[in-house]
Image (tube, rainbow, N blue to C red):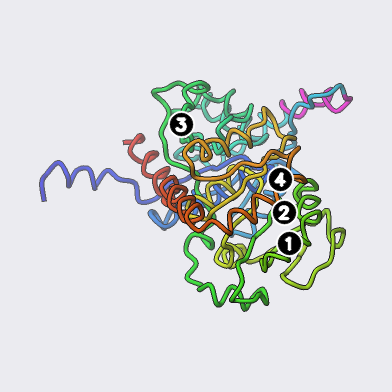
Amino acid sequence: MPVELYIQIEKMPNKLRVLISGGGTGGHIFPAIAIANEIKDKYPNSEIEFVGAKGKMEMEKVPAAGYKIHGLWIAGLQRRLTSKNLVLPFKLISSLWVSRRIIKKFKPTFTVGVGGYASGPLNYMASRMGLPVYLQEQNSFPGITNKLLKNTARKICVAYDGMDRFFPKEKIVMTGNPIRQDILNSTCTRDEAMDYFKLDKSKNTVLVVGGSLGARTVNEAIEANLNAIEKEGVQLLWQTGKNFSGEFGSFSWGNRTAFIQRMELAYKAADVVVSRAGAMSVSELSALGKATIFVPSPFVAEDHQTKNAMSLVDKNAAILCKDVEAKEKLGVLVIDLLKDNEKLASLQTEITKLGQPNAAESIVNEIIKELG
């Protein structure tokens, strides 16, 4: 073995201490957990802890994944006039103080911020204490926390082109978004998926997902087109979301549920997917090569879901249906796509080219390389 290579291997850490911070939504939490799992796979002796916002979903999801999490008393700035903003300075001061205490006690090798309220105080304080800070940005339009932290970070791992509009170009690394490992590593067959959801194996299947809570526009558009879809001999696997349980039209030619637990099976069953365009949905569908019609939510900051979707649409890798046009056009788009085998195959091919299934590994490799 060359001496230089031997020295490099000897210098590589076999035990890392890592603080990962952020959350608020699954789009932040699932990538964070995927990064943690990848670190554990590469360096099994490593110790990893999380920092989240009290009362947010990370306080439940992270422990369920097997990791300890600390909670900060923090929230975001409200965009409208409200008394909640008066408390924000006190929450920020409290979160900075608690973050400093966590860092001093845990003594991390480095910190990773994935966006969300809790990422700000923890990573700002880490940088002030001389620790390496790394960021992961899921969307094509970054959140306010990552934009504020851009000067403290050593590297910023992104999933979309053109991010030098927001971050220093020399810090940007294209890695893609880490996706849930149960989805990525699933070995189930289409027949197993169809049996699980009690679907007809001889029919084309459209998976409709508007997020875990649901999307009213998407649900209303599907309900308005139930008869037309049924006439085409197409079946639905329809997640209405927890907010709309039992609210939309009944039918016997498919499966409607408030929430799908086994998304890896749902993706396997689907010939076409109708979905919002959150960063994680876009990344999962790209990694799996699913022909998709995106209906971006107009109710998100800077309309970033449309920007996420257009990154695929501009490359002929997906179809866009505007939220305001969904009730009129979504049913027609679904039916026309299922009739056009050439278009269906083309979408599957092109979206697969954009998938980055090894994003978590790329992020961890970049961090270790930068640490030297």
CB under 8 Å between discs 2 and 3: no
Is 68 contained in the magenta span? no
Q: Looking at the rendering, in which quadrant would you find the C terminus?
A: top left
Seen from the viewer's position, the closer of residues 14 and 149 is: 149
* Mark 2 or 4, nearer chain start: 2
Quarter occupied by residue 80: top right
Q: Which mark is residue 329?
A: 4
Residue that badge 2 annotates: 212
Seen from the viewer's position, the closer of residues 194 and 36 is: 194
Q: Please tell me whether residue 145 is drawn above or below residue 360 in the rendered image.
A: above
Seen from the viewer's position, the closer of residues 220 and 132 is: 220
Q: Does residue 35 appear anywhere in the picture?
A: yes
- In space, the residues marked 2 and 1 are separated at their CA atoms by 6 Å
Q: Does residue 104 appear anywhere in the picture?
A: no
Mark 1 or mark 4, which is nearer to you?
4
- Magenta-colored segment: predominant secondary structure: helix
- In space, the residues marked 2 and 4 are separated at their CA atoms by 23 Å
Kind of residue at disc 1: Phe
Q: Which mark is residue 161?
A: 3
Report the span colored magenta. Answer: 82-92
Kind of residue at disc 3: Asp
How would you rate the neighbour count of disc 3 (Cα within 10 Å): few for under 14, some for 14-19, many for 20 or more? few
Seen from the viewer's position, the closer of residues 206 and 81 is: 206
